[in-house]
Image (cartoon, grey):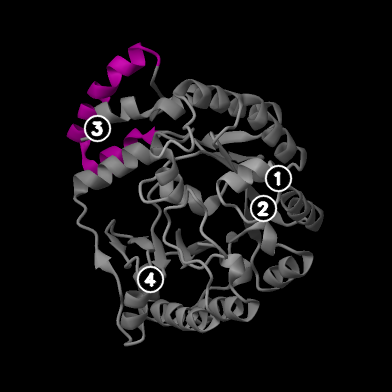
Amino acid sequence: MAGVYIHIPFCHGKCAYCDFYSLGAPVASLMRRYVSALRTEWSLRADELAGSDISTVYIGGGTPSTLPLPLLRQIVEALEEGGIDARSLEEFTIEANPEDLTGEWLDAVRGLGINRVSIGIQSFSDRELECVSRRHTALRAEEALAVLSESGMNYSADLIYGLPGQTLRDWQTNLEKLIGFRPPHFSAYLLSYEPGTPLYARLQRGEVVEATDFLAEEMYHVLCQMSLDAGYRHYEISAFGQPGYEARHNSGYWNLTPYLGLGCAAHSLSPGGERVFNPSNILEYLRKLENNATAFEQDAESDTDRLNDYIITSLRTDAGLSIEFAGNRWGEPVVNRLLDAARPFVVGGRLEIANGRVRIPEHNWLTADAILRELIF
């Protein structure tokens, strides 16, 4: 099993909280150069997954729905020329924002073999949306969700909680509205104030106030209960799926499934466990690919770093950490040391060890960092 991630760095405008690599106000000529470079990179690097069954493709960003459909078609055609049958993939996802999503657009992407859409709703409150520089309105978000729901397309929707000025009741209202559409899958993220973002600068100037830990935990517990009552499986700290609709591509990141990342700022994990990354600079990326050279650099990650990655990601899921997998990959002494460090938390009820797995109970996921700090090597 393996996946392919394709980064589209273009957006209509930058959201105030976003620290992903992206560019606002995209230029058509730059988009064309970028897609050509993506096609070249795929031709140069497809062999990195040789022998692996590619089962998922994820086009993320940025905002991939800003990409003109003819250019999106070129990407899919390049994948198919490289041996990927888009229509046979378990999951082929594209991210979109509500302002781009129409019935015509949805029909077009479905015609390319894309079978899943991930839509960034974030909030159903115009005030909250404006506060973080989202371009769509609450009404447009509802219209886009209605189009998705009526289409029968598999989709996921994103919400953010802990937005500036958001109350517990505001958050409940957002959840009620989203769950009312019965999305097959949704993600809910606690707002993070990342250095270098406009929202972080506003926080530093005292123009906005971060949600207190108490409010964030209340919001999280409401999220857990409402999703459970609605029949969703909470399978990762931020991810909720109806039975059978868990995100296959993203789940691969949490269990160390190999994937190839294409595009500027994209990361990859080889079948052998090595990580590489492309530059977070579109001009540097284009310069290398237009000279028919790869752009990636080796991540200076040690085997201990890889172990810590696995501990941190796996313990934020309901599956937890596999003792057998960790033992086979890093050795019995490492597992024994891990289990020794875990025992005080088991006694205190903050960790569970059962059926060959170490798990953090769901109600502790949001505050798991204190546990993880004691478990990592």
The reply to whether the magenta stretch includes residue 74 is no
Residue 308 position in % (x across, y down)? 27, 40
Residue 74 position in % (x across, y down)? 56, 81
N-terminal of the pair, mark 2 or mark 3, is 2
**Quarter of the view holding residue 51:** bottom left
Q: Which mark is residue 183?
A: 1
Look at label 1 and name its amino acid. Answer: Pro
Look at label 4 and name its amino acid. Answer: Ala
SS majority, magenta: helix
Q: Are marks 1 and 4 in contact (CB under 8 Å)?
A: no
Q: Secondary structure at mark 1?
A: loop
The span picked out in magenta is 321-349
N-terminal of the pair, mark 1 or mark 4, is 4
Tell which of 298 and 347 is nearer to you: 298
Tell which of 138 and 205 is nearer to you: 205
**Quarter of the rendering occupied by the N terminus:** bottom left
Look at label 3 and name its amino acid. Answer: Val
Q: Are marks 2 and 3 in contact (CB under 8 Å)?
A: no
Question: What residue lies at 20% left-to-right and 44% top-to-bottom?
Answer: 304
Characterize the local packing of mark 3: few (<14), some (14-19) or many (20 or more) Cα atoms within 10 angstroms.
some
Q: Are marks 1 and 2 in contact (CB under 8 Å)?
A: yes
